Amino acid sequence: MPSAKLRLLAASTLAALVSWGCAGTGGGMAAKSSTGIPLGTSGPHAVQPLPDKPRFGQPISENELLAWNIDIRAPDGQGLPAGRGTVAEGKKLYDAKCLACHGEDAKGGSVYGTMVGGVGSFVKGPRVLTPGSMYPYAPILFDYIRRAMPMDRPQSLSANDVYGLSAYLLHLNGLIPADATLDANSITRVMMPNRNGFLVDDRPDTNAARCMTNCK
Amino acid sequence: MGRMIDVPSDRGSRPGPASTGELNGVLKSRREFLARGMAVAGGAAATGSALAAPLEIPPAAREMGRPIPEAMYGMPSKFEAHVARRRTDVLKNRQNWSDWSMTPLQHQPGIITPNGLVFERHHAGTPDIDPKTHRLAIHGMVRQPLQFTVDDLMRYPSVSRFHFHECSGNGLTDWLKPASVTVQQTHGLLSGVLWTGVPLSTLMEEAGIDPRGTWVLLEGADGAGHTRSVPMEKVLDDSLIAYAMNGEALRPENGYPVRAVIPGWEGNVSVKWLRRIKVGDQPWHFRSETARYTDPMPEGKWRQFSMVMECKSVITSPSGGQQLKGRGFHEVTGLAWSGVGKIRAVDVSFDGGRNWREAVVEGPVMDKSLTRFKIGWNWDGAPAVLMSRAVDSTGYVQPSVEDVKKSRAIMGFVQHHNAIQPWSVNEKGEVRNAIGQA
């Protein structure tokens, strides 16, 4: 009995090694994804062999998934819908649907802190995190507002509404002029101050020793 | 009930060092203990003196208990009502939809967190999703986009695995000086769960991954549509679609009816109420992986895609806000875990990190799972500073805050805090958070 179990474990480890090349070998966080993200290591997992490959998924077309397919790939704006909105239209919508929680001119309200400013606050601190100071790409704002805001009625806004609201918030952050109009093309071109503010995970970044006596 | 005198915050008062009300609470229960202790333990002590009065037959032995109802979900004893998840009392949010509540680790023996105590972190509250209407879709760079009902998912060969679950923000408030009183507040965004579900690789294989598909988007069906990008390697390695936890269906606040489980990685990539998986050839850079869940670094930079939860440990008893029940023997115990493997060893120091002793690591010791450690301690009544330090199977040694400070910026929303947690004990046996002071 134990030997059968062992064989199963060994087989799945081997399978993991063959197909992913990085699993089960130890070595700290040395295992990295093809894009350089530390993956950690993985122990062997007993997974039942699937000789008959049960298949229970029902085919579905991309067309049937249209209403769900709302993600936007922020760096190049892939997935941004048609439509457009101006700063002025955005302000009107903001005052009606967002101000109660986010406050006048998005400077902070009953429920959430400021959504403007903070650029230049990261070096000395305190770091002020707003869409203007933090987002590396402007389409993140579109993606987030469309899926999650207004918090009390998410996914209720049209594409035009979201372009307008994004334009208004970007304008309040001094990143586009008062007469700007945003669409799929122009929102992708807005230069965000924190564009180069990110480093890819490079941990482990500590090298503590296991000292046992007289350590301090 | 407990090996320590009650934690004030367990009684619902806001914890904070020695406000009069809390102090009274502690003293009161201490008096109670002493009174009870005289009657019960006192007589059993080595003095051998006779008991003042013999033990009485307890009331429960003189009456019928509650009958068995026809059907009922069992609940803990009413005397354990103080053991509850609690919201943060340090970083108070102005609303409680995008908020979190924490596991009372000071009350958890073993390595499994009961489902009603598994920590929560949501971005738009807890949805109530009907499993009959819920659908999970896999699409994007796949041969055949697919949809699954929850029943479909349950028909696949299942796996069950123990894993720790930890929020990247666990320890958020306590780096340089104490802000939290209890271990629930310092480390309670941590739980141990036996997840049951389907390996994600099974479903991905069925949809047929385009060889250029290197990243996967996971999206929730909640009001936040919470979304993360995860590298394909991790998805195919040990990730699950889970529908059960600790022997029952997922709780609504933990993702009912289905969620992703990405073992050993920061909790919020294990997207709850999972509705959509999309395959792509690069990450999406959502708000949740740029503006949030990134680590402040020197020179105003941010570390991104820092998803592994590194090796860490904490003493849960005795821990902040508790009080030792007198001198003599105490079992010092806590939890250790690592997102990159198993726990190899845990050392405990009683003198603020000068000298260390290896604790007993209690099995089972499992990959990316909570692991229990224990060590006996005879308290002589003198002030002490207790701390634990874990080593994982890769040889990585849990760092101190000083070690971490060398590479990361400790300011604001610091994430992935895996540094050593000291607890100080004074002459009265009161235990306090000593972060930044030892």
Image: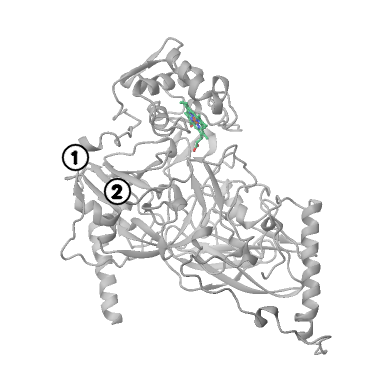
Q: Position of residue B215 (x, y in %)?
A: 30, 44
Quarter residue B105 falls in: bottom right
Q: Is residue A192 left or right of residue B429?
A: left
Residue drawn at the location 29% of the way across and 34% of the way down = A67
How crowded is the residue under tag 1: few (<14 C-alpha within 10 Å), some, or many (20+)? few
Q: From mark 1 to mark 2, how far is it between C-alphas?
A: 22 Å
Please determine whether, in this image, residue A121 is positioned above or below residue B362: above
Question: B430 or B108: which is nearer to us?
Answer: B108
Residue type, label 2: Met
Q: Position of residue A172 (x, y in %)?
A: 51, 18
Residue drawn at the location 23% of the way across and 57% of the way down = A19
Residue drawn at the location 78% of the way across and 69% of the way down = B32
Residue designated by label 1: A61
Q: Which element type, helix, strand or loop, lies under badge 2? A: helix
Please determine whether, in this image, residue A129 is positioned above or below residue B129: above
Question: B41 or A157: which is nearer to us?
Answer: A157
- Chain to which the residue tagged by mark 1 belongs: A
User: Can residue A80 be seen in this snapshot?
Assistant: yes
Q: Quadrant of the N terminus of chain A?
A: bottom left
Residue designated by label 2: B232
